[in-house]
Image (cartoon, grey):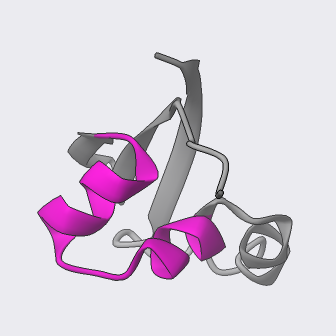
Amino acid sequence: MPKKDKHVYAFYKGEDILSIGTKKELAEALEVDIKTISYYVSNAYKDRCKNIAPKNKNHIVVVDLGEE
């Protein structure tokens, strides 16, 4: 049985917050797969975007706000 994620995340596009919720709630609200949200939270995505974020005003960032 998969572990239930009780963490809450904030989804930003640039400086605008688009949604707050669990990975599942964000995926439903933004009409993307849960794997997409998981990727945005991953270190791989953060490393890939280190040089892009300062230049791109529409950069996507998902911040872990902790447990509900």
Q: Residue furthest top?
A: 68
Q: Is residue 53 visible?
A: no
59 or 29, which lies in front? Answer: 29
Q: Decide whether residue 37 is among the magenta residues.
A: yes
| Residue at x-position 14% and y-position 60% | 29
Query: x and y percent of residue 8 in the render?
Result: 46, 32
* Quarter where residue 26 is shown: bottom left
The stretch of residues the image draws in magenta is 21-40
Position above or below: 46 against 19 = below
6 or 59, which lies in front? Answer: 6
Query: x and y percent of residue 46 in the render?
Result: 75, 67
What is the total number of numbered labels drawn onto the structure image? 0
Query: x and y percent of residue 18 in the render?
Result: 20, 51
64 or 52, which lies in front? Answer: 64
Query: x and y percent of residue 55 in the render?
Result: 55, 76
| Residue at x-position 38% and y-position 69% | 57
* Quarter where residue 60 is shown: bottom left
| Residue at x-position 26% and y-position 51% | 25
**7 on left or right of 2:** left
* Quarter where residue 2 is shown: bottom right
Q: Main secondary structure of the magenta part?
A: helix
32 or 58, which lies in front? Answer: 32
| Residue at x-position 49% and y-position 80% | 36
